[in-house]
């Protein structure tokens, strides 16, 4: 039996892991096919950093819709939700990937209140606002599905987090990877996901957290052991296989469950 086409939205889709998700998702061999529409969101769609995304969208005009969204700005998120809503049918939105984030690499002594506020704004308040603004479309997708249980083909939010945000990792990561505002923000994102998972359990909207691995991107640096292609190949397989058992859970790009 062939699967129903799914609608997907990705934040921070113009470079790094977000762009790689777009690249791989439009490939007909992707585990998440068929797609009805892919909303590739970025804060400056006409700028130089979105050149590759614009070229991809030009090649796949029926699938990729480039949407302007600054995840640090609630009104921008609201406007993009209105735009996406006008393009979506009654079937709603199946999958939201909260991927956009920033990393400020400072120790606790060096971190300013501004560093912490800026990081929280993008990495925590951003995903929260995306969940809130796109909730009507996720709810529509959940109601529209005739399949019981949860999945990313029905209605789901994948929050891209990091093992750098795990309290249990502090002793062995602290020397290597200071980035205090970032790590605190990812711990908060994990909690946001846990709260959402509890709140939307009955509505069968899946809320899950994903660690993409340590990857060679602008954020991950050239020292990382894997490239975007390898990370996202794993990420898409894992997303496609998600079910009720991933609700409120952290999984890595290889499908391993990670304890908090
Ligand atoms: P990059 O720094 O390479 O890319 C970050 C993306 O987020 C860019 O598209 C950037 O857009 C976007 N972004 C940042 N701020 C905003 C904003 N206010 N509004 C809209 N978009 C914004 O990071 P990665 O691709 O490496 O990371 C992607 C995700 O994976 C993040 O959530 C990160 O925390 C997580 N992760 C990454 C790891 C790694 O090793 N790379 C490890 C663990 C987790 P712009 O071009 O406009 O700045």
Image: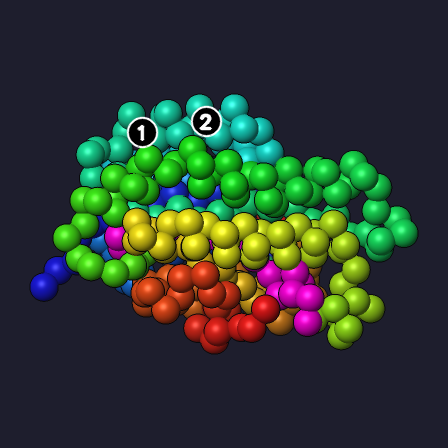
Looking at marks 2 and 1 on the same chain, the residue that comes earlier in the sequence is marked by: 2
- Nearer-the-camera pick, 241 or 237: 241
Residue depicted at 43% across the width and 55% down the height: 197
Tell me whether circle 2 and circle 1 mark residues in contact (CB < 8 Å): no
Q: Quadrant of the N terminus?
A: bottom left
Residue beneath disc 2: 78
Q: Position of residue 189 (x, y in %)?
A: 58, 52
Q: Which residues are magenta?
A: 153-168
- Residue 152 is marked as none
Query: In the picture provided, is 23 more to the left or to the right than 88?
Result: right
Element carrying mark 1: helix
Could one spot residue 247 in this view of the protein?
yes
Residue depicted at 81% across the width and 39% down the height: 113
Q: Quadrant of the C terminus?
A: bottom right
The furthest residue to the right = 109
Q: Quadrant of residue 87?
A: top left
Query: In the picture provided, is 11 more to the left or to the right than 138?
Result: right
Relative vertical location of residue 217 with respect to residue 256 in this rendering, above or below: above
Q: Position of residue 55 (x, y in %)?
A: 42, 39
Q: Position of residue 169 (x, y in %)?
A: 70, 71
Query: In the picture provided, is 200 more to the left or to the right than 217?
Result: left
Determine if the C-beta at disc 1 is less than 8 A from ligand 1: no
Residue beneath disc 1: 85
Count residues near mark 2 (Cα–Cα under 10 Å), then give few for <14, some for 14-19, many for 20+.
Answer: some
Relative vertical location of residue 33 with respect to residue 82 in this rendering, above or below: below
Q: Position of residue 223 (x, y in %)?
A: 70, 66
Determine if the C-beta at disc 2 is less than 8 A from ligand 1: no
Per the image, is 107 magenta?
Answer: no
Could one spot residue 13 in this view of the protein?
no
Element carrying mark 2: helix
- Nearer-the-camera pick, 150 or 159: 150
Residue depicted at 52% across the width and 41% down the height: 128
């Amino acid at each position: 039996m062939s699967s129903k086409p799914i609608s997907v939205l990705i934040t921070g889709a113009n470079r790094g892991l977000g762009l790689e998700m777009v690249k791989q998702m439009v490939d007909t061999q992707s585990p998440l096919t068929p797609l009805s529409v892919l909303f590739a969101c970025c804060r400056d769609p006409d700028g130089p950093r979105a050149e590759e995304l614009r070229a991809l969208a030009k090649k796949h005009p029926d699938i990729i819709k480039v949407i302007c969204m600054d995840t640090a700005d609630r009104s921008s998120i609201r406007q993009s939700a209105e735009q996406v809503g006008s393009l979506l049918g009654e079937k709603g939105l199946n999958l939201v990937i909260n991927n956009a984030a920033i990393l400020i690499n400072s120790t606790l002594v060096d971190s300013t209140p501004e560093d912490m506020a800026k990081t929280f704004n993008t990495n925590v308040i951003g995903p929260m606002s995306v969940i809130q603004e796109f909730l009507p479309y996720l709810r529509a997708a959940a109601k529209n599905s005739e399949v019981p249980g949860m999945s990313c083909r029905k209605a789901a939010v994948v929050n891209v987090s990091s093992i750098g945000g795990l309290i249990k990792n502090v002793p062995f990561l602290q020397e290597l990877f200071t980035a205090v505002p970032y790590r605190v923000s990812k711990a908060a994102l994990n909690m946001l996901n846990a709260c959402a998972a509890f709140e939307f359990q009955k509505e069968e909207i899946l809320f899950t957290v994903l660690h993409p691995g340590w990857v060679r991107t602008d954020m991950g640096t050239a020292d990382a052991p894997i490239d975007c292609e390898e990370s996202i190949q794993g990420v898409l397989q894992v997303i496609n296989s998600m079910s009720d058992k991933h609700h409120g859970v952290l999984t890595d790009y290889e499908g391993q469950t990670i304890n908090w």
